[in-house]
Image (cartoon, rainbow, N blue to C red):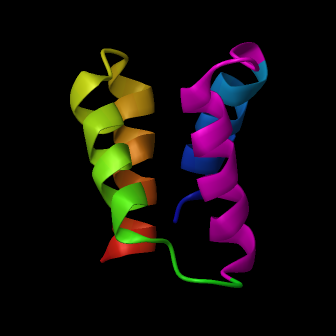
Amino acid sequence: MQEYSRILIEQYCMIHRNTKKSKFLWDLVDLSYTMECEPEEWEALQLERYINQERNPELREALEDLDEFLFE
């Protein structure tokens, strides 16, 4: 996973601290650093929903990068 993608997602999470989306994404980014456990299927489905809903092209690309890294 590209570091730029992680940075974009982390910035989003810091700006939108009190949302379910940011908490979810923060956990996935944290997992991408450590890979202590495998992400679950429901997490892949939720990330896919967030990707489809994302309007910011840079953040969308970062989420796609995260998806590829964790689930493919």
Residue 47 location in percent, x, y? 37, 46
Q: Answer left or right for 49 relative to 29.
A: left
Work out whether residue 17 or residue 67 is closer to the camera in this orientation and state it: 17
Q: Answer left or right for 62 relative to 36.
A: left
Residue at left offset 41%, top offset 44%? 63
> Up-down: is 54 above or below 46?
above
Q: How many numbered marks, from 0 up?
A: 0
Q: Is residue 31 magenta?
A: yes
Residue at left offset 41%, top offset 28%? 58
Work out whether residue 53 or residue 43 is closer to the camera in this orientation and state it: 43
- The secondary structure that dominates the magenta segment is helix
Residue at left offset 50%, top offset 72%? 39
Residue 20 location in percent, x, y? 59, 28
> Which portion, as a residue range, is magenta?
15-35
Quadrant position of residue 13: top right
Residue 69 location in percent, x, y? 43, 70
> Up-down: is 59 above or below 26?
above
Q: Answer left or right for 37 relative to 17.
A: left
Work out whether residue 71 or residue 64 is closer to the camera in this orientation and state it: 71
> Up-down: is 2 above or below 15?
below
Classify the position of the C terminus by image quarter.
bottom left
Work out whether residue 25 or residue 41 is closer to the camera in this orientation and state it: 41
Quadrant position of residue 59: top left
Considering every residue shown, the one lying at the far left of the view is: 52
